[in-house]
Amino acid sequence: MWACAVGSVLGEVFGTIARLRRAKPLHPRGTVYDAVLRRRGSPEPWGAQWLDVPGEDHGLVRLSRSVGLPRPLPDVLGLAFTFSGPAGDRHDVLLATTGLRPGARFALLPRRDPFAVPYGSLLPYRAPRGLVLLAAVPVAGAGFRLFTAAPVGRWREFATLELAGRTGPAPDQPIRFDPVLHLPPGLSWPPVLARLREPAYAAARRA
């Protein structure tokens, strides 16, 4: 299928970049923060407890620049959140700077200030009640409001993400995120998107 073919090409590209850099193929440098996700629950249920039911998740957030271009040049910015579930299983949520309008939700947009622009999941997850996109919108201070929406639907807030402070004297940590292996609770990738993404992240893991 075309998704497998495109995924294989992306895997080769990601693997080559990683070998040349001897580091992550994308988002090589960033800043890591302690973080708390406070979930109030989606106003319209998705059939996934993590989106629908109030709760709290503690973890780490990493803000980064995808290509690693020097400031003040714009770059596609990334927001990655990792946390553990009640059973100790790991979950990773990866967002990048996109638009919020229906046509712009699937476009990566270079930006400068990580605390002044919206982030989106770019590709939709599959929930029991349909396809769902995630988005994070900054608020005053070090934090974000988190939203869900159908691919062309209205955004609805389900949580807030608070950054409590940097994790140590060094701004970054050797953390690797994998949205293929560590999906948010109750969500999955549509099969065609899983085939598209897996080779690229597998290449990054090998590197």
Image: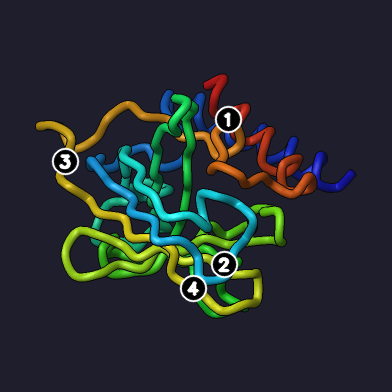
Q: CA distance from mark 2 to mark 1?
A: 24 Å
Q: Amino acid at mark 1?
A: Thr
Q: Amino acid at mark 4?
A: Arg
Disc 4 crowd, CA 10 A, few/some/many (<14, 14-19, 20+) = some
Q: Tell whether label 3 touches label 4 (CB within 8 Å).
A: no
Task: Identify the disc placed on residue 166.
Answer: 3
Occupied quadrant, residue 203: top right
Q: Amino acid at mark 3?
A: Arg
Q: Secondary structure at mark 3?
A: strand
Question: Mark 1 — residue?
Answer: 16
Q: Nearer the viewer, mark 2 or mark 3?
A: 3
Task: Identify the disc placed on residue 156.
Answer: 4
Tell me the residue at 62%/60% (across/down).
46
Question: Who comes first in sequence, dot 4 or dot 3?
Answer: 4
Occupied quadrant, residue 130: bottom right
Measured as percent of width and height from the top left, residue 104 is found at: 56, 74
Disc 2 crowd, CA 10 A, few/some/many (<14, 14-19, 20+) = some
Q: Tell whether label 1 touches label 3 (CB within 8 Å).
A: no
Question: Who comes first in sequence, dot 2 or dot 3?
Answer: 2
